[in-house]
Image (spheres, rainbow, N blue to C red):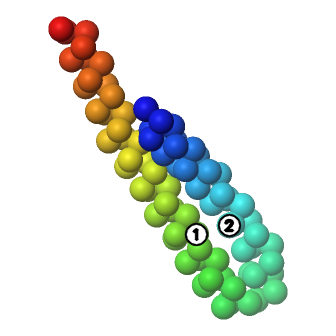
Amino acid sequence: MMIALIAIGINAGATLAAPVIISHTVDTAIRSKDYHAVWVFSLLLLGVYLVALGGSYVQTIVMGGVGRRVLFQLRN
């Protein structure tokens, strides 16, 4: 259950970080026409989304296992 809570925290943090990265990119890099920074922030955003995907996957797998164990215990 603790792994699921950690995965939820990672997923939530990554999901909340994405709009911050996007707004920072728009406010600084695009405004000053620094296209190298746009690419760097795009790669950073891709990394954040991949971390969120991994956290969501782990959360789904672990919580599915927890649900199956609870149902098994209830049936017995």
Residue at position x 80%, y 78% from top? Answer: 28
Figure check: 6 above or below 17: above
Task: State the SS at label 1.
Answer: helix
Q: Is residue 7 visible?
A: yes
Figure check: 6 above or below 71: below
Q: Please, what is the three-letter code of the amino acid marked with disc 1?
A: Leu
Relative placement, left or right, of 7 versus 34 is: left
Dot 2 alpha-carbon crowd within 10 angstroms: few under 14, some 14 to 19, many 20 or more? some
Residue at the front extreme of this rendering: 2
Quarter of the image with the C terminus is top left
* Quadrant in which residue 69 is drawn: top left
Dot 1 alpha-carbon crowd within 10 angstroms: few under 14, some 14 to 19, many 20 or more? many
x then y, percent, for residue 30? 74, 81
Quarter of the image with the N terminus is top left
Label 1 vs label 2, nearer the camera:
1
Q: Which residue is mark 2?
A: 22
Any mark on residue 70, and which? Answer: none
| C-alpha span from label 1 to label 2 | 8 Å
Relative placement, left or right, of 68 versus 22 is: left
Q: Are marks 1 and 2 in contact (CB under 8 Å)?
A: yes
Residue at position x 44%, y 41% from top? Answer: 3
* Quadrant in which residue 38 is drawn: bottom right
x then y, percent, for residue 27? 80, 73
Q: Please, what is the three-letter code of the amino acid marked with disc 2?
A: Ile
Mark closest to the chain's N terminus, 1 or 2: 2
x then y, percent, for residue 63? 37, 33
Residue at position x 81%, y 86% from top? Answer: 32
Figure check: 44 above or below 69: below
Q: Which residue is mark 1?
A: 45
x then y, percent, for residue 57? 37, 49
Task: State the SS at label 2.
Answer: helix
Relative placement, left or right, of 43 versus 59 is: right
